Amino acid sequence: MLSLLTTKRPTTAPAPPPNYGVYLVTDSTPAILGDRDLAQVVEAALRGGVTCVQYRDKLGEHAAVVATARKLHVLTRRYGVPLLINDRVDVAVEVGCEGIHIGQDDMNVHEARKLVGNDKIIGVTASNADEAIRACEDGADYLGLGTVFSTATKKDTKSIIGPSGVRTILKAMVEAGHGAVPTVCIGGINNDNAAKVLAQSSAAPAKSLDGVAVVSAIIAAEDPAEAARCLAGHVAVAAIPLVVGAVGRTTPLSHNMTNLVVQNFAANVALAVGASPIMSNYAAEATDLAKLGGALVVNMGTVTPEGLANYKQAIKAYNDAGRPVILDPVGAGATAIRRAASAEILALGRFAVIKGNVAEIQTLHGHSSSSTSSSTSSAAAAAAPQQRGVDSTSELTVPSRARLAAALARRHRTVVLVTGPTDIVSDGARTYRVDNGDAMLGRVTGTGCTLGTTVSAMVAAYPQDALLATVAAAAVFGIAAQYAVDRDEVRGPGTFVPAFLDELYSIQRATAKGDLRWLVLARVQGVQVDDGEASNGKA
């Protein structure tokens, strides 16, 4: 049997930048909050997938505002989400939260920076291109653009700019060299118009919004968690064409260390989605290949001592180069040798994405659980799920799979993709379900492996958010399958494969031309993950 490593995992990668995807601005007025407790509403929103919270209370007494801010900060830190204070820099400094947000009539960025320090986030509101560019030049970390639509939560609105006004500002930012500064839009955004606003305001491929900022859409919602989940789904879907477009523009290298059965198929899938494939299981090449700006797929379909040594060397090369690695532990629970090999690989490197079916992810979850305490190792080994070949014989409900994915993602600071009729994607803080695909994918050898190839291309091309890149990969892969099975010439697996490749290619070409009609098929939703570790048993 292959022996387990005792070496420690490499130092984890730096913490990711703030995520502004679903940005909650609080409002404590009775007209919006009613008689509910603000902290309870915010906590529900965090469970639903809010990624940034701004506490806004311009009129409250200092002591009361500080007390509320401290209470909110406890919650946001628990969920790994930044807390920003609107305008009141003194409160932010006293609480020690992650930053502030200032408007055009508030303290300027330079003065604020002196007070909060260089390690804090400073956001600025901008309603036109001049304000946006000036804020960027002054050192703003992100911008809030608006007001998009009229709103009752902000009485001093200077102008309503609409989605077209947002798009004008985004273009101006790019032309002025500030395209990398994150942006959200605010003002009248809700679950009924978020998708349309994100699409209509986009200045892609140059720049698009990084998220939406909302007030009453969550604070006044009957179910704040569900409102946040719906918004998270809109943000994820809006990112899909951005990811697909990035692959087409950059043609990233997809380095596949995979089994001979699927090498040709994987190479063709990589080409169809716009990537540049190389099939190389010889790890001595990895150091040079890692310098080319792509991603590595380690597909453990064939496990031998020589192959395992090559995997280790290649993973180290890509980790050293700071490039993403996608781990596909094929059949991880099928044999004792595979269980040992997957545990060894998992302990060795850093992974941008771990992809597998339920049984494979359960196996990895059991390994990583046993590594935290020797007293649980026997129980974890006994609970390790068995597989029939590379197929999963384990069944879990969607909520159970979401808990499993989130638990493994948190433990290894990675993105986990659990494949199945409903794919689950989680980075431990945000979790999505993707309901695209067709049963025909399960009748063709290697489709799971080539999904890993697709993930590698999209993560390499969209490094700012590996979670959304993985969601995009799962959705595009599934949509292409849905289109393929509807073609008249497709009668079974043999005719499905070429049609599937054609549809992957068609999606890439259509996106490059700005034709996003295919996106209407995307079925992506946020998923609430209950507290507690995932179970290895059937739920």
Image (cartoon, rainbow, N blue to C red):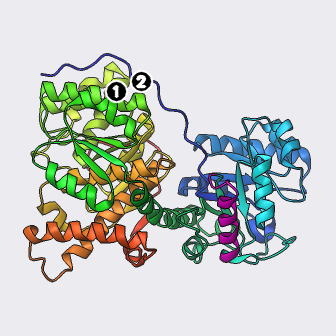
Please state which amino acid type lies under the numbered disc 1.
Answer: Lys
Q: Is residue 364 left or right of residue 111?
A: left
According to the picture, the residue beneath numbered tag 2 turns out to be 10
Residue 374 sits in quarter: top left
- Residue 216: assigned label: none
Q: Position of residue 37 (x, y in %)?
A: 72, 57
Q: Earlier in the sequence, mark 2 or mark 1?
A: 2
**Residue identified by numbered label 1:** 316
Q: What residue range appears in magenta?
A: 164-180
Q: Is residue 249 above or below residue 366?
A: below
Q: Is residue 58 visible?
A: yes
Query: What residue sits 9% from the left and 45% below the top?
Result: 389
Residue 221 or residue 307, whichever sits in front: 307
For the residues bearing labels 2 and 1, Cβ distance under 8 angstroms = yes
Q: SS for tag 1? A: helix
Above or below, 474 against 359 in this view is below
Question: Closer to the camera, 494 or 206?
Answer: 206
Q: Residue furthest bottom?
A: 488
State the image coordinates of residue 526 (x, y, percent, origin top left).
47, 61
The image position of residue 419, as x and y in percent, is 28, 54
Q: Which callout, 2 or 1, points to the residue nearer the camera? A: 1
| CA separation in Å, label 2 and label 1 | 9 Å
